[in-house]
Amino acid sequence: MPVCFGTAANFRKEVLTFEVVGFRVSYHAILGRPYYAKFMAIPNYTYLKLKMPGPKGVITVGSSFEHAYECDMECVEHSEAQAEDEALTATLDKMASEALDSTHRHVGSFKPAEGIKKVPLDPNRSDDKALQVSATLDNK
């Protein structure tokens, strides 16, 4: 995706590859070291500025402290909500596994039980198609 910094009179444009994530965040994109290197940009977190060389001088990209604070608060709220979701998911997973464990104790598995006999589906044919029935069942 082409990314451009600066103004019409002085700008830098590079093609960057982004990874799309499936959750809501307060930033539209997060640039890391490889992209800073591609633009030869220097971030200054204290002053909320990003500076890079342009064809007609230094390009400065910045934000306000208020906007940065709003983004931070949004990130905190999102993180707290995600932590609550993860805790709820963990609780539900635990409850589901406990329910499965309790039902598996009473329900048979796919392994054949001891004392079974094979009953042919069609006594007139010898095609080895048969049901497995417990040998301990009453004849009725």
Image (tube, grey):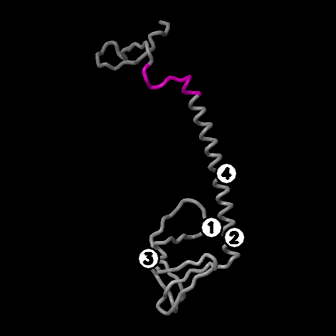
Vertical placement of residue 98 versus 40, above or below: above
Q: Earlier in the sequence, mark 1 or mark 4?
A: 1
What SS does tag 4 mark? helix
The residue under label 2 is 70
Numbered range of the magenta stretch: 102-112
The question of residue 107 being in magenta is answered with yes
**Residues tagged 1 and 4 counted as in contact (Cβ below 8 A):** no
Kindly report which numbered mark, 2 or 3, lies closer to the viewer in this rendering.
Answer: 2
Real-space Cα distance between discs 2 and 3?
Answer: 29 Å
Q: Which class describes the residues within 10 Å of circle 2: few (<14), some (14-19), or many (20+)?
A: few
The residue under label 1 is 26
Real-space Cα distance between discs 1 and 2?
Answer: 9 Å
**Residues tagged 1 and 2 counted as in contact (Cβ below 8 A):** yes
Where does residue 92 sit, x and y in percent of width and height? 62, 41
Where does residue 40 sit, x and y in percent of width and height? 47, 80
Q: Amino acid at mark 2?
A: Glu
The residue under label 4 is 84
Q: Which class describes the residues within 10 Å of circle 1: few (<14), some (14-19), or many (20+)?
A: some
Q: Amino acid at mark 3?
A: Val
Q: Which mark is residue 15?
A: 3
Vertical placement of residue 31 versus 98, above or below: below
